[in-house]
């Protein structure tokens, strides 16, 4: 038996009362919360006392949506984050090749460029990437599109005769036939799936590095938000070797990999060595900054009448909903545009009425960037959860102003409207799109400022406490784990994060500068900052 009392700092419980003097933990479970003198009574003499030294202890952060296996794969790729020109992209690729010396014919992969921030204001093409004498694929920061060189296109089997797949685009040159290297949505995801993977052990090492990134940010429950067989093997390999320090919740791709759940029943909706399958995932549209999100009204500053496009027709989405309900599995649905949001709402409402069931699968609208007020009201009635990528206000707020105009752009990630409509809401980073920095996300939700200093909808700001709920209590509810995680209460797991300052007490503009001092999972420190 191991017992520890935490005290000597601020303890933020996310319960009533909001603050406590001390917490007693026994064998990774919270046993009591209250006054230290009371908790000390009855404890054996060997009970450890953890002095917080004035720091702030609160429930560990819970990641409502990201892709830990994709983050792991980027750790073996060229990081193009912040690249400002085509020349810089080529320079970074060449520097990586010089450093790693890949074998002839080996793929070189890169991640993180954003055409919105390149001097050329467009995507790279095969002519640019043909300067690299290896097969190359560079992935956009959104993960929805990218570009390959001629060697890469050949390896993936993309040629002039290759048709555009449903819900995707193969970029073409002026003749309308020859691929120019650009691949969008399903064209990108389906063709890049053919790229050979590194060795299993190399992937597992990268997975451990990726896991550490989450732990350093105070996150102890992590998502893999689109799990395909090769990525499931990475996760399962870590679990079987007891190398997972965080809880990981996987969501297989429903369209092509529904069988993953049936084939792995010990992991289905229950943890096995810290890994579980939480439900299914589907995409209904693309990226707002990439102008592939499906809208009811046209984009601005582009082709007249262009509204983006759907991935599936209505009947297919309804079929997905039926399968999720039939299997009693939660469904995560990627929707950025309001047309995609409407398709999800209509399909779920129809199928739920057909089923005449009282079961709750807590469907989650992932991103919900441009969801409308009338849609939020309908989501509340259907008990849908909205998981907002609220850091878009900072990272792409200025791009959204150009793409959608001010009236629509300042309402992206409408968290305040969700609260007032009675919708359960969570916040995520969609890692590896951005790093899993929860404190930065809380700062974004509270302040809603773009990089150019534009206030992105003051009326949609939330309080620091409301923002914290999105990544603690509400996130636990999203995972059906509200009785185990998300707050500091007797009987819950001792998953904590220790911060140097209280997010509820600092100037709201300083929240992003708060530091994670330690992360505790089931009563055991899994990360400690060097002091």
Image (spheres, rainbow, N blue to C red):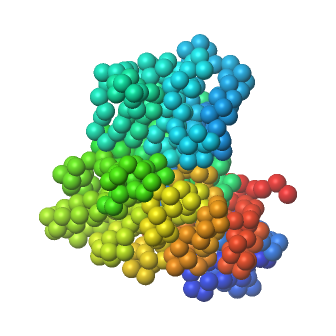
Looking at the picture, tell me which residue is in the foreground, 61 or 511.
Answer: 511
Residue depicted at x 73% and y 77%: 506
Of all residues, the one furthest to the top in this rendering is 104
The answer to whether 316 is drawn above or below residue 20 in the figure is above
Q: Is residue 437 left or right of residue 62?
A: right
Looking at the picture, tell me which residue is in the foreground, 499 or 430.
Answer: 430
Question: Residue 454's x, y, as percent?
Answer: 61, 68
Q: Is residue 161 left or right of residue 81?
A: left
Using the rendered image of the protein, determine whether residue 244 is visible from the camera's viewpoint.
no
Residue 340 lies in quadrant: bottom left
Of all residues, the one furthest to the right in this rendering is 531
Q: Quadrant of the N terminus?
A: bottom right
Q: Is residue 360 left or right of residue 40?
A: left
Residue depicted at x 34% and y 39%: 168
Using the rendered image of the protein, determine whether residue 463 is visible from the camera's viewpoint.
yes
Residue depicted at x 42% and y 57%: 300
Q: Is residue 42 left or right of residue 172?
A: right
Looking at the picture, tell me which residue is in the foreground, 419 or 146.
Answer: 146
Residue depicted at x 67% and y 78%: 504
Question: Residue 263's x, y, as percent?
Answer: 33, 40
Q: Quadrant of the C terminus?
A: bottom right
The answer to whether 339 is drawn above or below residue 376 in the figure is above
Question: Residue 211's x, y, as percent?
Answer: 61, 47
Q: How many marks?
A: 0
Looking at the picture, tell me which residue is in the foreground, 76 or 187.
Answer: 187
Question: Residue 100's x, y, as percent?
Answer: 69, 23
């Amino acid at each position: 038996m191991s017992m520890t009392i935490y005290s000597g700092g601020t303890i933020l419980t996310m319960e009533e009362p909001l603050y406590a003097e001390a917490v007693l933990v026994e064998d990774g479970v919270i046993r009591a919360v209250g006054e230290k003198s009371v908790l000390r009574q009855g404890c054996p003499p060997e009970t450890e006392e953890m002095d917080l030294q004035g720091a702030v202890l609160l429930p560990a952060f819970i990641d409502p949506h990201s892709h830990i296996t994709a983050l792991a794969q980027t750790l073996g790729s060229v990081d193009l984050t912040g690249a400002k020109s085509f020349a810089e992209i080529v320079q970074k690729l060449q520097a990586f090749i010089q450093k790693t010396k890949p074998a002839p014919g080996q793929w070189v992969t890169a991640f993180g460029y954003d055409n919105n921030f390149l001097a050329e204001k467009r995507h790279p093409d095969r002519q640019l990437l043909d300067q690299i004498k290896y097969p190359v694929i560079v992935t956009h920061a959104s993960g929805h599109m990218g570009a390959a060189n001629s060697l890469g296109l050949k390896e993936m089997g993309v040629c002039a005769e290759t048709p555009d797949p449903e819900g995707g685009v193969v970029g073409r040159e002026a003749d309308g036939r020859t691929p120019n290297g650009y691949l969008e949505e399903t064209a990108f995801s389906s063709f890049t799936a053919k790229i050979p993977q590194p060795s299993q052990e190399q992937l597992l090492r990268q997975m451990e590095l990726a896991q550490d990134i989450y732990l350093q940010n105070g996150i102890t429950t992590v998502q893999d938000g689109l799990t395909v067989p090769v990525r499931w093997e990475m996760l399962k390999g870590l679990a079987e070797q007891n190398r997972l320090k965080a809880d990981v919740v996987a969501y297989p791709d429903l369209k092509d990999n529904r069988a993953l759940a049936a084939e792995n029943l010990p992991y289905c909706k229950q943890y096995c060595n810290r890994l579980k399958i939480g439900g299914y995932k589907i995409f209904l549209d693309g990226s707002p900054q990439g102008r592939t999100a499906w809208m009811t009204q046209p984009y601005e500053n582009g082709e007249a009448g262009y509204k983006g496009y759907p991935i599936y027709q209505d009947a297919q989405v309804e079929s997905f909903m039926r399968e999720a309900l039939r299997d009693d599995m939660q469904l995560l649905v990627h929707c950025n545009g309001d047309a995609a949001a409407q398709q999800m709402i209509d399909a779920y409402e129809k199928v739920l009425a057909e089923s005449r069931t009282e079961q709750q699968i807590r469907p989650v609208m992932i991103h919900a960037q441009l969801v409308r007020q009338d849609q939020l009201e309908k989501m509340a009635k259907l008990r849908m959860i909205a998981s907002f990528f609220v850091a878009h206000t900072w990272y792409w707020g200025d791009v959204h102003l150009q793409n959608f105009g001010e009236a629509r752009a300042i309402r992206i990630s409408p968290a305040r409207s969700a609260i007032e409509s009675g919708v359960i809401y969570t916040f995520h980073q969609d890692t590896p799109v951005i790093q899993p920095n929860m404190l930065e996300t809380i700062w974004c939700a509270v302040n809603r400022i773009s990089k150019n200093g534009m206030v992105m909808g003051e009326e949609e700001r939330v309080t620091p406490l409301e923002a914290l709920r999105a990544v603690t209590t509400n996130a636990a509810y999203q995972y059906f784990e509200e009785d185990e995680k998300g707050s500091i209460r007797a009987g819950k797991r001792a998953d904590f994060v220790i911060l140097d300052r209280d997010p509820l007490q600092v100037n709201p503009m300083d929240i992003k500068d708060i530091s994670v001092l330690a992360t505790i999972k089931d009563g055991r420190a899994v990360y400690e900052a060097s002091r």
